[in-house]
Amino acid sequence: MTTSEQTPSMLELMDRRSVLHPFTHVSDYAAGQTPAPFIVRSGSGIRVRDAAGRELIDGFSGLYCVNVGYGQERIVSAMTEQARQMPFFHVFAGATHEPAIELAEKLLQISGPSMKRVFFGLSGSDANETQVKLVWYTNNVRGFPKKKKIIARRRGYHGATIMTGSLTGLPAYHQGFDLVTDVVRHTTAPDGFWSGGLGPEAFARKCADDLEKLILLEGPETVGGFIAEPMIGAGGAVPPPAGYWAAMQEVLKRYDILLMIDEVVTGFGRVGYMLGSERWGIQPDLVTLAKGLTSGYAPLSAVLVGEKVWDALQLGAAKHGMFGHGFTYTAHPLGAAAASANIEIIESDNLCENARTVGEALLASLKRRFEGEPLVGDVRGEGLFCAVEFIAEGTPQRHLPSSLKFAARVSALARDQQLLLSRTMPFGDIIGLAPPLTLSKADAEEIVDRLYKAYRTALDELTPAQRSGEIA
Ligand SMILES: Cc1ncc(COP(=O)(O)O)c(C=O)c1O
């Protein structure tokens, strides 16, 4: 019997006894003490279908990956054709292939003249790991062997490997792993909603001052890089306050610190531009791309290498010989073919523009429906990446007790409304929305309707004491 002939409950049983799932309470899951898993079977456009045949709107594009939506035949046929012609070849020492060349040229065209080379990997984590190695290598070559610490931000997410898990500024992802601590520091999360009432400009200034204080405390001669997402992603979908990036870049320049930008979520139209760096006037030294690079049709990531690092790599070649870094699947032909077809769709179907206009409509509708409602603290977004944040009633501004799991409850109830949301975000009670960029204004209204119904049901389940955060 194949798995597609199994009943959903049999599949659930098999999954619980065989798969080790990421970011999951493993013993509760194994013991069947968590809600039934969502067993997804197929997708088309902005919708996915589960193993029982129910169709849901995917409000989070998988894990904010599927930017062009499901069932894009142009990507499927590019990958099929590539698999038939040449499913694999490496790009080590003297070998290369057309899909890698075509994609690298395209990515350099998108990123502009400040980027000089493209290095390919498979995931956001390995690309950020590559960035760290490049910063360390660069500073060794430049004769600054102590300049190695990397400053990240609280509530940043950069991956789950040993180094990138450490850069990730969400403590829940550190527990029990003995990650790297000696070369990683974290600075202020640019979340204006929790700024204690500072206006955007004053808060942006404070973030830059906090960064400078940390650099001076550590010693500028020990700080090699600063890594950040253009807007906070997994940490709560928060656009930066006005003036943030100009102020931060000024500080980094002053202390000769490389700017490592993580565009895993913000790239490829998500915030209404091909890159978030373009949206916020960021001039990075290194850029990580993943997720929307292939819209998740194949695993592929890329690091764009800016001039300073490229110059150091050339000097390093004279000193160390070959560049001793890479993976078997670097520039995998199927991933590269998927990415080129995906980018062609984003461009030809004007998906950046659609993300801007439909994103504006989605945010306006969320604000109309949610602002002023009980427990709603903040409604925000950029392009097609929006969030509703829930807090306790009353003053001072504070979180709901985590034991209530309010956002998780809203998310579960949304599924009854046939709306699929993110795994809940790991800070406070935040519902993130990141639907495919092919979304129409009517789809956006439908999402808000379904989310609102889920929220009202979850709200009605709470007692007044729970709403005010007095009883968990
Ligand atoms: C901003 C950001 N960087 C890096 C990663 C890690 O990517 P991956 O899970 O492909 O390793 C993620 C994943 O969600 C992310 O959101």
Image (tube, rainbow, N blue to C red):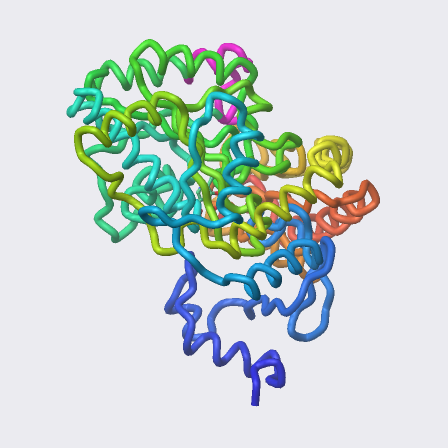
Residue 223 vs 14, above or below: the answer is above
- The image shows residue 304, relative to residue 446, as above or below, that is above
Q: Answer above or below: position of 211 versus 384.
A: above
The residue at the point 53 percent across, 36 percent down is 105
Question: Image check: 419 left or right of 191?
Answer: right
Whether residue 315 can be seen here: yes
Does 350 sit left or right of 22 as displayed?
A: right
Q: Does residue 428 appear in this view?
A: no
Coordinates of residue 315 in the picture (x, y in percent): 24, 25
Q: Which residues are magenta?
A: 191-207
Spot the residue most to the bottom.
1
In what quadrant of the picture does the N terminus appear? bottom right
Q: Position of residue 165 (x, y in %)?
A: 33, 45
The answer to whether 375 appears left or right of 209 in the picture is right
- Taking depth in this image into account, of 177 and 3 the one nearest to the observer is 3
Q: Nearer the viewer, residue 166 or 30?
A: 166
Which residue is drawn at the image coordinates 60% and 84% (left, top)?
Answer: 6
Check residue 328 for magenta coloring.
Answer: no
Quadrant of the picture in which ligand 1 is shown: top left
| Picture layout, residue 216 above or below residue 173 | above
Residue at (55%, 31%) from the top-left corner? 238
